[in-house]
Image (spheres, rainbow, N blue to C red):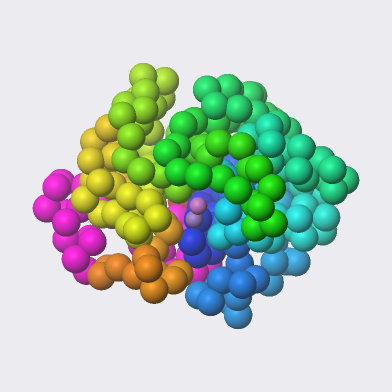
Amino acid sequence: MKITFYGQNSLAIEVSGTHILVDPFISENPLSKDKVDILKLKADYILLTHAHEDHILDAEAIAKNTGAKIVSNYEIAMYYQAKGINVHPMNHGGNWKFDFGNVKYVNAVHTSSFPDGSYGGQPGGFLIEGEHKNIYIAGDTALTMDMKLIPLQTKLDLAILPIGDNFTMGIDDAILASDFVECEKVLGVHYDTFAFIEIDHDEAKKKFFDAGKDLMLLEIGESIEL
Ligand code: NI
Ligand code: MN
């Protein structure tokens, strides 16, 4: 499983020859807009955690360019189906076996409305189990006791957690989240894109290190292999 970071919560995941994009927000992200051409991105599936602009901005353009299927909660799926895009609706607690592996839409504590004000259902995260590697994408969320449910289903290889604070968990809560999901290996996301969520990278890494955990912060376009 190969995971590439495109800023904010935008990720590309390659698993079993399938290309998955998560929360594409690139063309107006000040950190990534000059580095990544959304029309060159491959996608078989686009997973959307919730309807906020910093997660869905490029989903329509990429779906129309690639023919990718959008996977999200029911309300978000219907929003894109009405635009002629292929969708797979899910909702909280539900699993589906895709050709690349199992996906579960899990709880998140946040909000979810589209930039035009239409209803985006309730926000979520994704548990992806594929190619013998299991990852948890928390999406935008507060620290929540529901995270303790994740290890009851799966032994994680990586937890992808927001760390920017203000709109989501900050560093200290992300360290607790990594305890809750029982995964010491964390990829930090949702930081530095805007002034509200700027973080001190060295301090963040030191706090994780002191807690006996590993926080990875990737450059735009940088990948890790699980
Ligand atoms: Ni959000
Ligand atoms: Mn966000």
- Residue at the spot x=85%, y=48% of the render? 83
Residue 104 in the image, given as x and y percentages of width and height = 54, 28
The outermost residue toward the top is 152
Residue 215 in the image, given as x and y percentages of width and height = 28, 54
Residue 159 in the image, given as x and y percentages of width and height = 38, 42
For residue 182, above or below residue 38: above
Depth check: 85 or 136 in front?
85
Depth check: 31 or 123 in front?
123
For residue 97, above or below residue 29: above
Residue 197 in the image, given as x and y percentages of width and height = 37, 65
The outermost residue toward the front is 117
Depth check: 191 or 101 in front?
191
The outermost residue toward the left is 210
- Residue at the spot x=36%, y=28% of the render? 146
Query: Does residue 220 belong to the magenta stretch?
Result: yes
Residue 12 visible here: no
**Which quadrant would residue 226 be assigned to in this image?**
top left
Task: Give the residues drawn in magenta, as a range.
Answer: 202-224
- Residue at the spot x=66%, y=43% of the render? 119
Depth check: 8 or 3 in front?
8
- Residue at the spot x=15%, y=46% of the render? 212
Q: Is residue 180 left or right of residue 91?
A: left
